[in-house]
Protein backbone atom coordinates (compact mmCIF):
# COMPACT_ATOMS: atom_id res chain seq x y z
CA UNK A 1 0.00 0.00 0.00
CA UNK A 2 1.15 3.54 -0.72
CA UNK A 3 2.80 5.10 2.32
CA UNK A 4 0.96 8.33 1.52
CA UNK A 5 -2.42 6.68 2.03
CA UNK A 6 -1.76 4.74 5.22
CA UNK A 7 -3.69 6.00 8.26
CA UNK A 8 -1.74 7.75 11.01
CA UNK A 9 -2.82 7.61 14.65
CA UNK A 10 -1.77 10.06 17.34
CA UNK A 11 -3.29 9.50 20.78
CA UNK A 12 -6.91 8.46 19.98
CA UNK A 13 -7.23 10.37 16.71
CA UNK A 14 -6.68 8.49 13.46
CA UNK A 15 -5.98 10.61 10.38
CA UNK A 16 -7.03 8.64 7.27
CA UNK A 17 -3.96 9.49 5.18
CA UNK A 18 -0.70 11.44 5.22
CA UNK A 19 -1.84 14.20 2.82
CA UNK A 20 -2.31 17.19 5.09
CA UNK A 21 -3.16 20.84 4.52
CA UNK A 22 -1.02 23.36 6.43
CA UNK A 23 -2.34 26.65 7.80
CA UNK A 24 -2.57 29.28 5.05
CA UNK A 25 -4.10 32.66 5.92
CA UNK A 26 -6.97 33.78 3.71
CA UNK A 27 -7.16 37.35 5.04
CA UNK A 28 -10.89 37.25 4.46
CA UNK A 29 -12.57 37.77 7.84
CA UNK A 30 -14.45 40.91 8.82
CA UNK A 31 -12.10 43.50 10.39
CA UNK A 32 -14.79 45.07 12.58
CA UNK A 33 -18.30 44.52 13.90
CA UNK A 34 -19.89 41.50 15.59
CA UNK A 35 -18.42 39.07 13.03
CA UNK A 36 -14.81 40.25 13.56
CA UNK A 37 -12.42 37.32 13.19
CA UNK A 38 -15.17 34.80 12.47
CA UNK A 39 -14.99 32.44 9.48
CA UNK A 40 -17.52 33.17 6.76
CA UNK A 41 -18.76 31.68 3.48
CA UNK A 42 -15.33 32.03 1.87
CA UNK A 43 -13.65 30.02 4.62
CA UNK A 44 -16.35 27.35 4.51
CA UNK A 45 -16.06 26.91 0.74
CA UNK A 46 -12.26 26.96 0.89
CA UNK A 47 -11.88 24.25 3.52
CA UNK A 48 -14.88 22.21 2.39
CA UNK A 49 -13.42 21.82 -1.10
CA UNK A 50 -10.16 20.34 0.23
CA UNK A 51 -12.06 17.97 2.51
CA UNK A 52 -14.22 16.77 -0.37
CA UNK A 53 -10.97 16.31 -2.30
CA UNK A 54 -9.70 13.69 0.16
CA UNK A 55 -7.26 15.65 2.34
CA UNK A 56 -6.67 13.66 5.54
CA UNK A 57 -6.02 16.56 7.95
CA UNK A 58 -6.85 20.21 7.40
CA UNK A 59 -5.23 22.68 9.78
CA UNK A 60 -7.17 25.92 9.67
CA UNK A 61 -5.06 29.02 9.15
CA UNK A 62 -3.27 30.97 11.90
CA UNK A 63 -6.10 31.96 14.24
CA UNK A 64 -5.49 34.77 16.69
CA UNK A 65 -5.82 33.96 20.38
CA UNK A 66 -6.64 37.64 20.90
CA UNK A 67 -7.49 40.61 18.65
CA UNK A 68 -3.93 41.94 18.77
CA UNK A 69 -2.60 38.43 18.08
CA UNK A 70 -3.83 38.47 14.49
CA UNK A 71 -1.41 39.07 11.63
CA UNK A 72 -3.88 41.40 9.96
CA UNK A 73 -7.28 42.88 10.82
CA UNK A 74 -8.71 40.40 8.31
CA UNK A 75 -7.47 37.25 10.06
CA UNK A 76 -9.49 34.67 11.93
CA UNK A 77 -9.69 34.67 15.71
CA UNK A 78 -10.99 32.42 18.43
CA UNK A 79 -11.41 34.68 21.43
CA UNK A 80 -15.23 34.73 21.59
CA UNK A 81 -18.27 32.47 21.26
CA UNK A 82 -19.47 34.01 17.98
CA UNK A 83 -16.27 32.75 16.37
CA UNK A 84 -16.71 29.33 17.96
CA UNK A 85 -20.19 28.91 16.50
CA UNK A 86 -18.99 29.96 13.04
CA UNK A 87 -16.15 27.42 13.18
CA UNK A 88 -18.60 24.63 14.07
CA UNK A 89 -20.11 24.84 10.59
CA UNK A 90 -16.68 24.10 9.09
CA UNK A 91 -15.63 21.34 11.47
CA UNK A 92 -18.96 19.52 11.04
CA UNK A 93 -18.51 19.40 7.28
CA UNK A 94 -14.87 18.30 7.47
CA UNK A 95 -15.79 15.44 9.78
CA UNK A 96 -18.64 14.43 7.45
CA UNK A 97 -16.05 13.92 4.70
CA UNK A 98 -13.73 11.85 6.86
CA UNK A 99 -11.24 14.71 7.25
CA UNK A 100 -9.77 15.49 10.67
CA UNK A 101 -10.23 19.19 11.52
CA UNK A 102 -7.26 20.99 13.05
CA UNK A 103 -6.61 24.59 13.99
CA UNK A 104 -3.44 26.63 14.45
CA UNK A 105 -3.46 28.87 17.53
CA UNK A 106 -1.32 31.94 16.98
CA UNK A 107 -0.07 35.29 18.18
CA UNK A 108 1.67 37.43 15.57
CA UNK A 109 3.82 39.47 17.96
CA UNK A 110 5.85 42.20 16.24
CA UNK A 111 4.57 41.14 12.80
CA UNK A 112 0.96 41.94 13.70
CA UNK A 113 -1.29 44.71 12.37
CA UNK A 114 -0.42 44.47 8.67
CA UNK A 115 -2.49 44.79 5.53
CA UNK A 116 -3.49 41.92 3.26
CA UNK A 117 -0.64 40.65 1.06
CA UNK A 118 -2.37 41.60 -2.18
CA UNK A 119 -2.61 45.14 -0.80
CA UNK A 120 1.13 45.23 -0.12
CA UNK A 121 1.20 43.74 3.39
CA UNK A 122 2.55 46.91 5.00
CA UNK A 123 1.85 47.72 8.66
CA UNK A 124 -1.43 49.56 9.21
CA UNK A 125 -2.52 52.03 11.86
CA UNK A 126 -5.72 52.67 13.75
CA UNK A 127 -7.24 54.39 10.71
CA UNK A 128 -7.13 51.02 8.90
CA UNK A 129 -8.25 48.81 11.82
CA UNK A 130 -4.66 48.40 13.08
CA UNK A 131 -3.17 48.36 16.58
CA UNK A 132 0.08 48.53 18.53
CA UNK A 133 2.16 45.37 18.12
CA UNK A 134 3.90 43.62 21.03
CA UNK A 135 7.12 41.59 21.14
CA UNK A 136 9.71 40.14 23.54
CA UNK A 137 11.92 43.16 22.86
CA UNK A 138 11.44 46.59 21.33
CA UNK A 139 13.05 45.47 18.07
CA UNK A 140 11.13 45.92 14.79
CA UNK A 141 11.02 43.15 12.19
CA UNK A 142 12.42 45.43 9.47
CA UNK A 143 12.57 49.07 8.41
CA UNK A 144 8.92 49.06 7.36
CA UNK A 145 7.59 47.85 10.69
CA UNK A 146 7.15 50.14 13.70
CA UNK A 147 8.98 49.47 16.94
CA UNK A 148 6.85 47.05 18.98
CA UNK A 149 6.08 47.46 22.66
CA UNK A 150 8.18 45.19 24.87
CA UNK A 151 5.99 42.81 26.84
CA UNK A 152 6.02 42.90 30.61
CA UNK A 153 6.09 39.64 32.54
CA UNK A 154 2.44 40.18 33.51
CA UNK A 155 1.52 40.63 29.84
CA UNK A 156 3.43 37.46 28.97
CA UNK A 157 1.40 35.51 31.49
CA UNK A 158 -1.81 37.03 30.14
CA UNK A 159 -0.93 35.78 26.65
CA UNK A 160 -0.20 32.30 28.02
CA UNK A 161 -3.72 32.35 29.43
CA UNK A 162 -5.09 33.50 26.08
CA UNK A 163 -3.62 30.44 24.39
CA UNK A 164 -5.30 28.19 26.96
CA UNK A 165 -8.64 29.98 26.52
CA UNK A 166 -8.32 29.65 22.74
CA UNK A 167 -7.67 25.92 23.09
CA UNK A 168 -10.84 25.52 25.16
CA UNK A 169 -12.82 27.31 22.47
CA UNK A 170 -11.18 25.26 19.73
CA UNK A 171 -12.37 22.11 21.47
CA UNK A 172 -15.90 23.54 21.75
CA UNK A 173 -15.75 24.40 18.04
CA UNK A 174 -15.18 20.74 17.13
CA UNK A 175 -11.47 20.66 16.35
CA UNK A 176 -9.66 17.36 16.96
CA UNK A 177 -6.08 18.60 16.51
CA UNK A 178 -4.59 21.84 17.82
CA UNK A 179 -1.30 23.29 16.63
CA UNK A 180 0.67 25.99 18.45
CA UNK A 181 2.31 28.42 16.02
CA UNK A 182 5.95 28.75 17.01
CA UNK A 183 7.33 29.59 13.56
CA UNK A 184 7.68 32.26 10.87
CA UNK A 185 8.74 35.15 13.04
CA UNK A 186 5.58 35.38 15.10
CA UNK A 187 5.51 35.84 18.86
CA UNK A 188 6.68 32.43 20.10
CA UNK A 189 9.40 32.31 17.43
CA UNK A 190 10.46 35.82 18.47
CA UNK A 191 11.03 34.59 22.02
CA UNK A 192 12.97 31.53 20.87
CA UNK A 193 15.47 33.43 18.74
CA UNK A 194 18.38 35.52 20.05
CA UNK A 195 17.99 37.53 16.83
CA UNK A 196 14.73 39.03 18.11
CA UNK A 197 14.85 38.33 21.85
CA UNK A 198 17.18 40.74 23.63
CA UNK A 199 15.61 40.41 27.07
CA UNK A 200 17.75 40.13 30.22
CA UNK A 201 15.08 38.65 32.51
CA UNK A 202 13.84 35.06 32.88
CA UNK A 203 12.55 35.10 29.28
CA UNK A 204 15.77 36.06 27.53
CA UNK A 205 19.43 35.21 27.22
CA UNK A 206 20.05 31.50 27.67
CA UNK A 207 18.42 28.72 25.65
CA UNK A 208 16.39 27.75 28.74
CA UNK A 209 15.12 31.30 29.18
CA UNK A 210 14.31 31.85 25.51
CA UNK A 211 12.29 28.63 25.36
CA UNK A 212 10.47 29.35 28.62
CA UNK A 213 7.51 31.20 27.07
CA UNK A 214 6.97 28.53 24.41
CA UNK A 215 6.94 25.75 26.98
CA UNK A 216 4.62 27.71 29.26
CA UNK A 217 2.20 28.05 26.34
CA UNK A 218 2.50 24.33 25.57
CA UNK A 219 1.87 23.42 29.21
CA UNK A 220 -1.16 25.73 29.45
CA UNK A 221 -2.69 24.37 26.25
CA UNK A 222 -1.91 20.74 27.06
CA UNK A 223 -3.61 21.18 30.44
CA UNK A 224 -6.94 22.08 28.81
CA UNK A 225 -6.59 20.07 25.58
CA UNK A 226 -7.94 16.53 26.12
CA UNK A 227 -5.48 13.70 26.69
CA UNK A 228 -7.03 11.75 23.82
CA UNK A 229 -6.40 14.50 21.25
CA UNK A 230 -3.01 15.37 19.70
CA UNK A 231 -1.22 18.68 20.05
CA UNK A 232 1.20 19.88 17.34
CA UNK A 233 3.87 22.58 17.38
CA UNK A 234 4.98 24.40 14.24
CA UNK A 235 8.61 25.50 14.26
CA UNK A 236 11.01 27.36 12.02
CA UNK A 237 13.93 24.96 12.10
CA UNK A 238 16.38 27.64 10.95
CA UNK A 239 16.32 31.37 10.36
CA UNK A 240 18.81 31.05 7.49
CA UNK A 241 21.20 33.35 9.35
CA UNK A 242 24.92 32.67 9.39
CA UNK A 243 25.09 33.58 13.07
CA UNK A 244 23.00 35.00 15.89
CA UNK A 245 19.78 33.10 15.18
CA UNK A 246 17.84 29.95 15.99
CA UNK A 247 19.51 26.92 14.42
CA UNK A 248 18.78 23.37 13.33
CA UNK A 249 20.75 22.16 16.38
CA UNK A 250 18.40 24.19 18.59
CA UNK A 251 15.41 22.66 16.83
CA UNK A 252 16.55 19.09 17.48
CA UNK A 253 17.17 19.91 21.13
CA UNK A 254 13.85 21.71 21.46
CA UNK A 255 11.89 18.90 19.81
CA UNK A 256 12.87 16.64 22.72
CA UNK A 257 11.77 19.33 25.19
CA UNK A 258 8.44 19.71 23.40
CA UNK A 259 7.84 15.98 23.48
CA UNK A 260 8.50 15.93 27.21
CA UNK A 261 5.83 18.61 27.63
CA UNK A 262 3.16 16.73 25.70
CA UNK A 263 3.61 17.75 22.06
CA UNK A 264 2.76 14.85 19.74
CA UNK A 265 4.18 16.08 16.41
CA UNK A 266 6.42 18.87 15.16
CA UNK A 267 5.41 20.58 11.94
CA UNK A 268 8.81 21.60 10.53
CA UNK A 269 9.07 24.80 8.48
CA UNK A 270 11.81 27.47 8.30
CA UNK A 271 12.42 31.20 8.19
CA UNK A 272 10.25 34.23 8.75
CA UNK A 273 11.96 35.91 11.71
CA UNK A 274 14.85 37.63 9.93
CA UNK A 275 14.34 39.95 6.98
CA UNK A 276 16.64 40.08 3.96
CA UNK A 277 18.02 36.54 4.28
CA UNK A 278 18.73 34.25 1.35
CA UNK A 279 16.55 31.14 1.39
CA UNK A 280 17.43 28.35 -1.09
CA UNK A 281 13.84 27.79 -2.18
CA UNK A 282 13.34 24.70 -4.31
CA UNK A 283 11.41 21.42 -4.35
CA UNK A 284 11.37 19.95 -0.86
CA UNK A 285 13.90 22.49 0.42
CA UNK A 286 12.71 22.20 4.02
CA UNK A 287 12.39 18.42 4.13
CA UNK A 288 16.00 17.83 5.36
CA UNK A 289 15.17 19.71 8.56
CA UNK A 290 12.17 17.48 9.23
CA UNK A 291 14.30 14.44 8.40
CA UNK A 292 16.93 15.47 10.91
CA UNK A 293 14.39 15.88 13.73
CA UNK A 294 12.93 12.48 12.87
CA UNK A 295 16.36 10.84 12.74
CA UNK A 296 17.73 12.35 15.94
CA UNK A 297 14.65 12.25 18.19
CA UNK A 298 11.59 10.07 18.74
CA UNK A 299 9.25 12.94 17.85
CA UNK A 300 6.89 12.37 14.91
CA UNK A 301 7.31 15.06 12.24
CA UNK A 302 5.52 16.53 9.25
CA UNK A 303 7.40 18.03 6.31
CA UNK A 304 6.41 21.06 4.26
CA UNK A 305 7.94 23.20 1.51
CA UNK A 306 7.29 22.95 -2.23
CA UNK A 307 6.04 19.38 -2.10
CA UNK A 308 4.01 19.23 -5.28
CA UNK A 309 3.75 15.80 -6.90
CA UNK A 310 2.69 12.37 -5.71
CA UNK A 311 5.98 10.57 -6.32
CA UNK A 312 7.90 13.24 -4.43
CA UNK A 313 5.54 13.02 -1.45
CA UNK A 314 5.59 9.22 -1.47
CA UNK A 315 9.40 9.17 -1.52
CA UNK A 316 9.64 11.47 1.51
CA UNK A 317 7.53 9.06 3.54
CA UNK A 318 9.03 5.86 2.13
CA UNK A 319 12.54 7.13 2.95
CA UNK A 320 11.53 7.82 6.54
CA UNK A 321 12.15 11.56 6.28
CA UNK A 322 8.74 12.45 7.72
CA UNK A 323 5.53 10.88 8.97
CA UNK A 324 3.28 13.11 6.86
CA UNK A 325 3.52 15.82 4.23
CA UNK A 326 1.81 19.21 4.20
CA UNK A 327 0.91 20.65 0.81
CA UNK A 328 0.24 24.36 0.73
CA UNK A 329 0.27 26.06 -2.64
CA UNK A 330 -0.43 22.78 -4.42
CA UNK A 331 -3.69 22.37 -2.52
CA UNK A 332 -4.61 25.93 -3.43
CA UNK A 333 -4.12 25.00 -7.06
CA UNK A 334 -5.78 21.60 -6.82
CA UNK A 335 -8.27 20.93 -3.98
CA UNK A 336 -8.55 17.28 -5.11
CA UNK A 337 -4.80 16.61 -5.06
CA UNK A 338 -5.23 13.68 -2.66
CA UNK A 339 -7.70 11.95 -4.94
CA UNK A 340 -5.45 12.39 -7.97
CA UNK A 341 -2.42 11.14 -6.04
CA UNK A 342 -4.34 8.08 -4.85
CA UNK A 343 -5.20 7.22 -8.42
CA UNK A 344 -1.54 7.59 -9.42
CA UNK A 345 -0.11 5.60 -6.51
CA UNK A 346 -2.83 3.01 -6.12
CA UNK A 347 -4.03 4.29 -2.76
CA UNK A 348 -7.51 4.57 -1.28
CA UNK A 349 -9.05 7.91 -0.44
CA UNK A 350 -12.53 9.07 0.53
CA UNK A 351 -14.65 10.21 -2.41
CA UNK A 352 -18.05 11.83 -1.73
CA UNK A 353 -21.00 9.85 -3.02
CA UNK A 354 -21.98 12.85 -5.08
CA UNK A 355 -18.70 12.52 -7.01
CA UNK A 356 -18.89 8.77 -7.64
CA UNK A 357 -18.87 9.38 -11.41
CA UNK A 358 -15.30 10.65 -11.12
CA UNK A 359 -13.81 7.49 -9.62
Image (tube, rainbow, N blue to C red):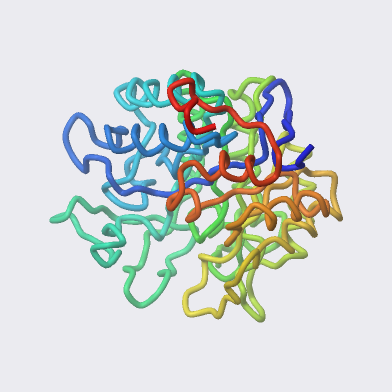
Looking at this view, name the residue that lies furthest to the left: 127
Residue at image coords 43%, 22%: 354
Q: Is residue 359 above or below residue 24?
A: above
Q: Is residue 112 above or below residue 274?
A: above
Residue at image coords 39%, 46%: 69
Image location (x, y in percent) of residue 25? 39, 49
Toward the viewer: 246 or 21?
Answer: 21
Q: Is residue 161 left or right of residue 30?
A: right
Image location (x, y in percent) of residue 289? 72, 62
Q: Is residue 11 left or right of residue 350?
A: right
Image location (x, y in percent) of residue 339? 56, 39
Residue 180 appearing in the image: no
Residue 231, image quadrant: top right
Image location (x, y in percent) of residue 107? 45, 47
Toward the viewer: 328 or 143?
Answer: 328
Residue at image coords 69%, 37%: 347
Q: Is residue 89 above or below residue 343?
A: above
Amino acid sequence: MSALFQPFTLRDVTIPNRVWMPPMCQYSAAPEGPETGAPNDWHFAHYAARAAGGTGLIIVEATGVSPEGRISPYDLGIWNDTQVEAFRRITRFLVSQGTVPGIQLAHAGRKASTDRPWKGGAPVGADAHGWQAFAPSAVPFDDRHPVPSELTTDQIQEIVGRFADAARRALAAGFEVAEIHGAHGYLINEFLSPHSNHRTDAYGGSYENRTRFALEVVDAVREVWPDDKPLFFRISATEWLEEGGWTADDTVRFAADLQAHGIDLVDVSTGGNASGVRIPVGPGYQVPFAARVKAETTMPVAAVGLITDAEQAEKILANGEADAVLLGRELLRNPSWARHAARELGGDVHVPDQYHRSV
